[in-house]
């Protein structure tokens, strides 16, 4: 936990409605606790698009798309007076969020991301996080 650096909240942002709700909740919680927020967005290369020389995808384009997601998410909340830093990481979402939250006091994610199977109660990322996080987890369900 981050007791020496103040209360720290990590929130996963993927552009889904659930992740935007998670960010809104994080901002409210941060105000109550005078906490800092780290917005984390994970990206990874699609399974296709590989040739014998490696990925044919543009690393910079994925980074820019993730940054745009975070910028749009910030525009959707009233974050005035709240310290929010954005972080973009390459890798599977659950692993990225678990690593980013190692020293956090709270990890907040939406219950459903941008994946399919909308009838499920929890997505695979939120399920993995609940089982493996080293800090308390809050899952926002729309």
Image (cartoon, grey):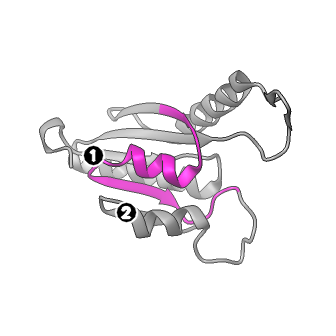
- The quarter of the picture where residue 70 lies is top right
The residue singled out by tag 2 in the image is 137
In the rendering, at what x and y percent does residue 6 appear? 18, 40
In the rendering, at what x and y percent does residue 97 appear? 46, 49
Q: Is residue 60 above or below residue 13?
A: above
Of all residues, the one furthest to the top in this rendering is 60
Count the marks: how many?
A: 2
Q: Is residue 127 above or below residue 109?
A: below
Numbered range of the magenta stretch? 87-114
Of all residues, the one furthest to the front in this rendering is 52
In the rendering, at what x and y percent does residue 3 appear? 14, 44
**Image point 31% across, 62% down: which residue?**
136
Identify the mark at residue 103; answer none if there is no mark: 1
Q: Is residue 94 above or below residue 4?
A: below
- Residue closer to the observer: 31 or 15: 15
- Residue closer to the observer: 45 or 106: 45
> Label 2 crowding class (10 Å Cα cut-off): few <14, some 14-19, many 20+?
many
- The quarter of the picture where residue 142 lies is bottom right
- Residue 27 visible in the snapshot: no
Q: Per the image, is 4 magenta?
A: no
**Image point 60% across, 77% down: which residue?**
121
- The quarter of the picture where residue 108 lies is bottom left
- Residue 83 visible in the snapshot: yes
Give left or right: position of 114 versus 21.
right
Work out whether mark 1 precedes mark 2 in sequence or the reverse, and give the earlier one: 1
């Amino acid at each position: 936990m981050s007791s020496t650096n103040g209360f720290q909240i990590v929130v996963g942002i993927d552009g889904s409605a659930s992740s935007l709700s998670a960010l809104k909740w994080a901002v409210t919680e941060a105000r109550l606790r005078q906490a800092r927020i780290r917005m984390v967005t994970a990206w990874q290369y699609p399974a296709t698009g590989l040739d014998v020389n490696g990925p044919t995808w543009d690393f910079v384009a994925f980074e820019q798309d993730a940054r745009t997601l975070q910028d749009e998410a910030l525009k959707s909340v009233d974050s005035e007076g709240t310290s929010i830093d954005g972080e973009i990481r390459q890798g599977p979402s659950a692993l990225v969020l678990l690593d980013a939250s190692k020293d956090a006091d709270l990890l907040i994610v939406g219950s459903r991301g941008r994946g399919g199977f909308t009838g499920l109660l929890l997505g695979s990322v939120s399920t993995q996080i609940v089982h493996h996080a080293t800090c308390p987890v809050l899952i926002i369900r729309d």
